[in-house]
Image: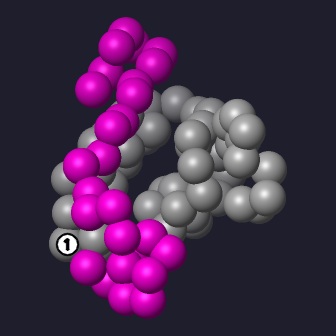
Amino acid sequence: MEISGWLMVLKPHLLPIEPLPFSGSINRLFWKKIFDDVSAFAGKEPCLVGTGKPCRLGVRILRMMPRALSFYDAMDDFPAW
């Protein structure tokens, strides 16, 4: 959801099955729209990508945008990284 011309927040609706084996393969079925939205938004200018938890989707988005700056909001979940 684009909040303004400079900020977009995505709340993916995925199955809560990470980090089970094959979870990325199953949830990948839901990723196409997310990738389309990110590409359309990030294609405008250089961007900053933030993720709220370690996940395969976040890693894939960062790989498709190798020049983007990024951050991870660790909150209280430091052992996850």
Q: Which quarter of the rendered picture does the C terminus lie within?
A: bottom right
Residue 74, given in percent of the width and then of the height, sits at 72, 41
Q: In the image, is residue 19 above or below residue 8?
A: below
The residue shown at (37%, 88%) is: 22
Amino acid type, mark 1: Leu
Q: Secondary structure at mark 1?
A: helix
Magenta stretch, residue numbers: 1-26
Which SS does the magenta portion mostly show?
loop
> Which one is nearer the viewer's eye here, 68 or 24?
24
Using the rendered view, name the quadrant where residue 70 is placed.
top right
Residue 30, given in percent of the width and then of the height, sits at 20, 63
Residue 22 is inside the magenta segment:
yes
User: Does residue 23 appear to the left or right of 15 in the view shown?
Assistant: right
Q: Residue furthest top?
A: 4
Residue 31, given in percent of the width and then of the height, sits at 27, 62
Residue identifier under label 1: 29
Q: In the image, is residue 49 above or below residue 61?
A: above
